[in-house]
Amino acid sequence: MTDSDANKMWGGRFQMSPAEIMEQINASIDFDKRLARDDLAGSTAHAEMLAAVGIITNEDKSAIHKGLKQIGEEIESGKFQYSRALEDVHMNIESRLKELIGEPAGRLHTARSRNDQVATDFRLYVRGQLDAFDAGLTALQMALAVKAKANAATVMPGFTHLQPAQPVTFGHHLLAYVEMFARDRGRFQDARKRLNECPLGAAALAGTSFPIDRAQTAAALGFDRPTANSLDSVSDRDFVLETLAAATICAVHLSRMSEEIVLWTTPQFGFLKLSDRFTTGSSIMPQKRNPDAAELCRAKVGRIAGALNSLVIVMKGLPLAYSKDMQEDKEVAFDAFDSLTVAVAAMTGMVEDMQPQPDAMRKAAGYGYSTATDLADWLVRELKMPFRQAHHVTGSIVALAEKQGVDLEALSISDMRSVEPRITDAVFSVLSVENSVASRTSYAGTAPHNVEKSAGIWLAQLEKQRQTG
Ligand code: ARG
């Protein structure tokens, strides 16, 4: 590729080659080559349609299809030579097509522009990512539901403010994340529905004078319909913003879960163990076992939210229709998609690998008078005390236990009666952590029976989705 070749891209008006720095700021090929497969699909569909409506001949179409197929093979095998002087993936492919088939290559760009071309390519690419996120999250939900079922009755502390609150089961805690990832999948599926309209044929911004069939290209590329306004078609990047917004929320969920893995694998908590496969050692401290994968999953949200922020700012205030600013949509989005992909896969691996430590969880579940609410509930149920009064009485009993340095269970009945004389021995039945969780049978509560049932429902549903998805 020489300078004079580069000028020919823009036809007769350009006589000077671009400044070196111009090429550097302008070229997107280093990153948009990721769109090559989608660009070939778009061009293949466009040529088919051009021939079907009689804008190009069938011979030209066949030559174009043959050339595009060969380019596809060159790209797959790594033989394709990308050139920066040709700016982007669209020009690189068209230029190679011309080398391969000559004049018919020049007819491919009839009734389209790079503006609708890039909008189409990127929609196809993002759609593929959305489908991959759905599959990855389904696998993660599966891993969580399997662990949850096995730990439906594993008692652990439940926290609020990171202070011991009430006992829960480990299975219940894991199913909380299954719900979050279900909502994430829902957001990705919603984004996919809105994304799935085809901009191809909007041309530069105004549509075209050629008798194109936009419904045909839309259907050929698996879109539900063509986009309805040519200006909007080339200037819209909502589909990227929406995907990044959903990815950010998903990354927040992964980050929260990661933080719990980091905390729970410390010797201080000791609730979980990760094997050598998901930990690293220290070069100086031989005893260390660091949860690096969880820490990195915790951190990925930074780049993903950063990508969303970056593109929101790029798009803000852009007049219609296409502006070159929009080329800045790709690098950040690619990075965010890669980050989410690896974080979901690593989290799935960690969930499969993690070994809960029921003894440590059980012991910690009793810390901090975690069954105090059960005592208050007993006073309400058995003594018909108003809850506010029961709360007060229980507070005094907890204070007494605290003074003696014992658990609620270990307090004598006479000590309890010194606070409320109507308390009977029957109260002890509600003070163990096992009885506490077993009593939480309200819909969506933590009772082992509930957890076992929800995990089973999730597993059946996820298995079905994996088969049909
Ligand atoms: N590389 C460009 C992008 O990513 C393709 C569209 C260029 N369009 C144009 N009118 N210069 O946005």
Image (cartoon, grey):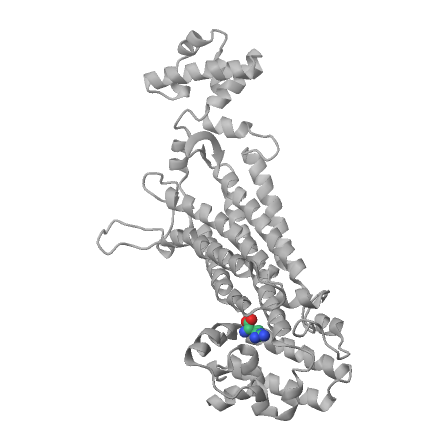
Residue 420, position as x, y percentages in the image: 47, 9
Position above or below: 151 against 205: above
View quadrant of ligand 1: bottom right
The image quarter containing residue 73 is bottom right
Residue 459, position as x, y percentages in the image: 59, 49
Q: Is residue 96 left or right of residue 256?
A: right
Q: Is residue 330 left or right of residue 202?
A: left
* The C terminus sits in image quarter: bottom right
Residue 433, position as x, y percentages in the image: 46, 28
State the residue in front, 41 or 396. Answer: 41
Q: Which residue shows up at 54% across the image and 51% down it?
A: 141
Residue 261, position as x, y percentages in the image: 41, 46
The image quarter containing residue 107 is bottom right
Q: Which residue shows up at 41% across the image and 53% down it?
A: 299
Q: Could one spot residue 344 in this view of the protein?
A: no
State the residue in front, 178 or 6. Answer: 6
Q: Which residue shows up at 75% across the image and 80% down it?
A: 210
Q: Which residue shows up at 50% across the image and 84% down it?
A: 80
Residue pushed farthest left?
284
Residue pushed farthest bottom?
102
Q: How many marks?
A: 0
Q: Is residue 190 left or right of residue 266?
A: right
Position above or below: 27 against 170: below
State the residue in front, 23 or 381. Answer: 23
The image quarter containing residue 120 is bottom right
Q: Could one spot residue 389 in this view of the protein?
A: yes
Position above or below: 100 against 230: below
